[in-house]
Image (cartoon, rainbow, N blue to C red):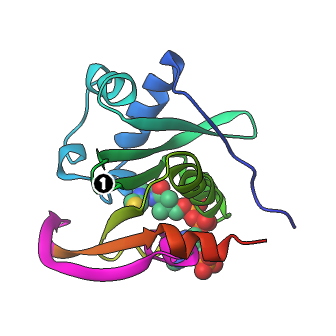
Amino acid sequence: MAGPSPTLRPPRHDDVVPYTEFLADPEVAVWLDDSAQVPLSAARVEAILFRDAWCLWAIECDGTFAGVTSLYHPDLVRGIARYSIVIGDRTRWGQGLGAAVTQQVTEYGFATLGLRKIEADVLEPDTAARAMLKRAGFAEDGRLRKDAWRRGQWVDRFLFSLLHEEWRQRNQT
Ligand SMILES: CC(C)(COP(=O)(O)OP(=O)(O)OC[C@H]1O[C@@H](n2cnc3c(N)ncnc32)[C@H](O)[C@@H]1OP(=O)(O)O)[C@@H](O)C(=O)NCCC(=O)NCCS
């Protein structure tokens, strides 16, 4: 069976409320930055969607807003940016949506923006995110030990990266 075919589109103002609700879900937020570990106001989420971002897209699947993905913290001298993805609609987890979005964003980063390297980091254990990145060809560069406080304990942060030449090799026809 074919996997999901998400559309990446610019965020819209009617995404603010559902995205605020997604980020208020502890099962989603626990994998995100420290800044998302407290409830975020709609005004803050609006800033995330419309003011803070470098390259940010709403993920739409079957005509419904399902989350947000971005390339952020660009370092254009070194040709590096960081990748993030939040599928806030948990009913969609485990169906290949993350893999399909990662494919589209890495293609944009390398083929359109000409990046040299895309980095990502994942908090332990986030098995799905690690599997998703590995499936997309990201290598695990290492881990920062006991780097974030989650659910009553310090957890490691896994560092991943994908080089332009690795991506090109995987996507040669
Ligand atoms: C991480 C996330 C984007 C994955 O999205 P998804 O649509 O569920 O991912 P996919 O269905 O494409 O699955 C990707 C891989 O993870 C595996 N996977 C999915 N859910 C899993 C789970 N609960 N446990 C173990 N593996 C899982 C899949 O089998 C697949 O591996 P494979 O390609 O080797 O078969 C989604 O869970 C999410 O948004 N989580 C919250 C935020 C987050 O963790 N962001 C990542 C920071 S980089």
144 relative to 89 in the view: left or right: left
Per the image, label 1 sits on a secondary structure element best described as loop
Q: Quadrant of residue 120?
A: bottom left
Image coordinates for residue 98, horizontal then vertical, percent: 58, 59
Q: Which quadrant of the figure contains the N terminus?
A: bottom right
* Crowd around label 1: few <14 · some 14–19 · many ≥20 (10 Å): some
Residue 141 on the magenta span: yes
Image coordinates for residue 21, horizontal then vertical, percent: 41, 34
* Region rendered in magenta: 129-154
Residue 50 on the magenta span: no
**Residue 127 in view (yes/no):** yes
Assess mark 1: CB under 8 A from ligand 1? Answer: yes
Image coordinates for residue 135, horizontal then vertical, percent: 57, 77
**Residue 132 in view (yes/no):** no
Residue shown at the point (62%, 60%) measured from the top left: 103
Amino acid type, callout 1 = Leu
Residue shown at the point (34%, 40%) measured from the top left: 24
Q: Quadrant of residue 79?
A: bottom left
Q: Which quadrant of the figure contains the C terminus?
A: bottom right
Residue lying at the far front of the rendered structure: 77
From the viewer's side, name the closer residue of 60 and 81: 81
Q: Which residue position holds label 1?
A: 32
98 relative to 154 in the view: left or right: right
